[in-house]
Amino acid sequence: MIDEPESRLEVTISPEVEAGQYANFASVWHTRDGFILDFAVITRPPAIADDPQSGTQYVSVPTRIVSRIRIPPAQVFELMKALEQQLTAFEKETGHKL
């Protein structure tokens, strides 16, 4: 029996992407083919607006999507595990429970 060599993911990142994008809002939705994560930033303070169709008022929260990530369904479980691990580590390091 021949042992297969281990796999090592070798990740690189461009300087433009390395800085990251600030987002204070996220939306998660799905299609038949995968999950979509939209990360957005609130661009202005919330304000009262009037719905032109119904005439009712609502709170408008202007946002701009800064990044959209599409992942296959199988990857969602791995992402959830990684987020849980990192949240647990964060809570241990900072003493803050979120």
Image (cartoon, rainbow, N blue to C red):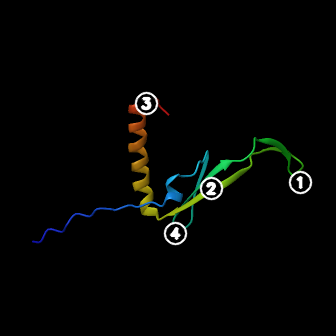
Q: Between marks 2 and 1, how big is the CA–CA gap?
A: 28 Å
Q: Amino acid at mark 1?
A: Pro
State how far apart marks 3 and 2 are (Cα). 28 Å
- The 10 Å Cα crowd at callout 1, few under 14, some 14 to 19, many 20 or more, is few
Q: Which mark is residue 33?
A: 4
Which mark, by number, is residue 52? 1
Residue plotted at (41% across, 55% down) = 77
Q: Amino acid at mark 2?
A: Val
- Three-letter code for the amino acid on which mark 3 is drawn: Thr
Q: Nearer the viewer, mark 3 or mark 4?
A: 3
The local secondary structure at tag 4 comes to loop
**x and y, in percent, of residue 97 in the image:** 47, 31
Along the polypeptide, which appears first: circle 2 or circle 4? 4
- Mark found first going from the N terminus, 3 or 1: 1
Camera-nearest residue between 48 and 64: 64
Residue 65 at what x, y percent from top left?
Answer: 65, 56
80 or 94, nearer to the observer: 94
Tag 3 residue: 94
Which badge, 3 or 4, is on the more N-terminal residue?
Answer: 4
The residue sitting at the top extreme is 95
